[in-house]
Image (tube, rainbow, N blue to C red):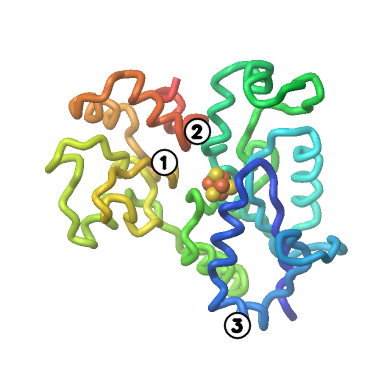
Amino acid sequence: MKLRLGVFKFTGCTGCQMEFLRLEDKLPELLELIDIVYWPMVTTKQWVGDLDLAFVEGSVSTPRELREIKEIRRRSKALVAFGDCAVTGCIPSIRNFMTQREAEKMVYPYPEWVESIGLRAVNEYVDVDVSLPGCPPHRNSILETVKAMILKRRPRLRQHPVCIECKLKDNSCLLTDEGQPCMGPVTCAGCGAICPTLNRVCEGCYGPMSASNAQSHAKILMETGLSKDDIRLRFRKYAGWTTEFQKQAE
Ligand code: SF4
């Protein structure tokens, strides 16, 4: 029997869903094994019945999203927090560092019409079976997650830092060799070290790696010449609301 899949969008930019669609060469094979029951970006089908697998992109930031995430959890056997917005809050979580009203005023001409709540990762409200980090997650890790769910096993997602992927590519280290403020040592791998391979520092878009030492890395970033404010913003940008980075982001 085919796996019944639903893909949902909360507060985010839709980039994670776009990356899912980048699996276009694999989709014909996948569609032999999965049935897309609900995915407003690709089908007009309405959501009927329960799901085997729900991919939830985006964070929870409105009362409507809060109601919906509980409903999705109730009706899904497995729930994947799909991408950094769902896993950590990602860039939208920057707004948590100001008051709700300040953030609303900055964006909307009539903030009194806006109904929003503090922005949170999905796992702050419901149990999550798989956290798939990345802004967006690489298509290979999306494929690995779907395959694992079909095979009823845990997906093999990386927990180590971007530095390992950098070394495997034989890149010279931007941090130690060139003194550039790279976030690779505290950032979860999975991207294939795209930025350092192109001679750009890692910005931290996969969020904290397992057991990251943010405090120590903040000291190292200071040695590269970054100001305290710059370091704060660097930790805040993608994962400032996580327990791992929150102290450095404040
Ligand atoms: Fe967009 Fe990144 Fe959020 Fe995905 S994780 S929805 S790509 S901002």
* Residue located beneath label 2 in the image: 242
Q: Position of residue 64 (x, y in %)?
A: 80, 38
Q: Determine the image quadrant of residue 248.
A: top left
Disc 3 crowd rating (10 Å Cα; few below 14, some 14-19, many 20+) is few
Give the secondary structure at mark 2: loop
Mark nearer the N terminus (2 vs 3)? 3
Task: Please state which amino acid type lies under the numbered disc 3.
Answer: Glu
Whether label 3 touches label 1, CB < 8 Å: no
How far is the residue under mark 2 from the one under mark 3? 37 Å
Q: Position of residue 212 (x, y in %)?
A: 35, 39
Q: Which of the pair 241/12 is nearer the observer?
A: 12
Q: Position of residue 204 (x, y in %)?
A: 39, 41
Image quadrant where one finds the N terminus: bottom right
Q: Position of residue 194 (x, y in %)?
A: 34, 55
Image quadrant where one finds the C terminus: top left
Q: Which of the pair 78/36 is nearer the observer?
A: 36
Instruction: Give the number of the mark in front: 2 or 3.
Output: 3
Whether label 2 touches label 3, CB < 8 Å: no
Give the secondary structure at mark 3: helix
Judge whether 250 appears above or below 147 on screen: above
Instruction: Give the number of the mark in front: 3 or 1.
Output: 3
Q: Is residue 178 left or right of residue 182?
A: left
Task: Please state which amino acid type lies under the numbered disc 2.
Answer: Thr
Q: Determine the image quadrant of residue 129.
A: bottom right
How far is the residue under mark 2 from the one under mark 1? 8 Å
At x 87%, y 63%, the residue is: 48
* Residue located beneath label 3 in the image: 29
Disc 1 crowd rating (10 Å Cα; few below 14, some 14-19, many 20+) is many
Task: Please state which amino acid type lies under the numbered disc 1.
Answer: Pro
Mark nearer the N terminus (2 vs 1)? 1
Q: Is residue 244 left or right of residue 26?
A: left
